[in-house]
Image: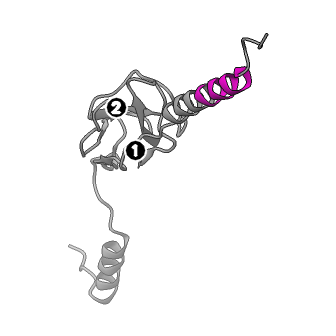
Amino acid sequence: MKPIFTNWHFINKRAVTLITGLLLLLISTDVRSQAIPPDPTSNSPQCIGTGVTMNFTGTVPAGETWYWQTSATGTSTADSISSYVVTVSGTYYLRSRDNNTLTWSAGAGSVTVMFTPDVSPPVFTSGPMINPLGELIWLLILQRHPIPPQ
C-alpha cells in the first residue's frame, strides 16, 4: 500500500511560500511611507498678544491627512486645517497620516514662528524745560553788558 501523503512536503513548502509572500506583502504595505509635507509658511514675526498664522500649501495626497504638530514626531490628530494660528513662539511641524493604515510620515515640514516684545512709545512728562546752555549764555551777556540799576 502506498502512503496517502506522498506529496506532503511539496504541499507544505508551497503553503509556507504563499504565507511568507502574503506576510511580506502585508508588511511592505503597512510600512508604506507617506510623502513628507512641504514646509509651511507664516506671517511671523508678530507682536506679542497677536497671533501668527501658519499655512500649508500644496495638495494633500488622496487618502492622507496633514496634521499640525508641536514636535517632529508628534501624532496629534487635533488640527488638520490649512491655516493654523498660534500665540507662542517655537517650531511647528506638519505631518502626514495615511487614513487607511493610520501610519505617519517619516518626516515633517516645519516652520519657526517668533513674537517681538511689546515696544511701548516713550512717555514724556510735561513741565518747564530747563536749558542749562541757554542760561549760561545769558549769564555771559549780562557780565559783559550789565543792566544799569534804575
Q: Quarter of the image containing the C terminus?
A: bottom left
Mark 1 secondary-structure assignment: loop
Q: Main secondary structure of the magenta part?
A: helix
Residue 15 point in image, percent of width and height: 63, 23
Residue 80 point in image, percent of width and height: 33, 28
Q: Nearer the viewer, residue 3 or 106?
A: 3
Alpha carbon separation for disc pair 2 and 1: 9 Å
Report the amino acid beneath label 1. Answer: Ala
Residue 52 point in image, percent of width and height: 32, 40
Q: Is residue 61 above or below residue 111?
A: above
Residue sticking out furthest to the bottom: 144
Q: Residue at x 30, y 74 (%)?
A: 134
User: Which stretch did the figure color magenta?
Assistant: 7-18
Q: Residue 75, which numbered label?
A: none
Is residue 38 found inside the magenta-colored segment of the image?
no
Q: Nearer the viewer, residue 101 or 23?
A: 23
Q: Is residue 74 left or right of residue 129?
A: right
Q: Is residue 25 above or below residue 46?
A: above
Judge the density around disc 2: few (<14), some (14-19), many (≥20) Cα neighbours within 10 Å: many
Mark 2 secondary-structure assignment: strand
Residue 95 point in image, percent of width and height: 43, 37
Q: Residue at x 24, y 79 (%)?
A: 147
Q: Quadrant of residue 87?
A: top left
Q: Residue 64, which numbered label?
A: 2
- Marks 2 and 1 close (CB-CB < 8 Å): yes
Q: Residue at x 61, y 25 (%)?
A: 19
Q: Is residue 4 above or below residue 131?
A: above
Whether residue 123 is visible here, answered yes or no, is no
Q: Nearer the viewer, residue 121 or 89?
A: 89
Q: Which residue is mark 1?
A: 35
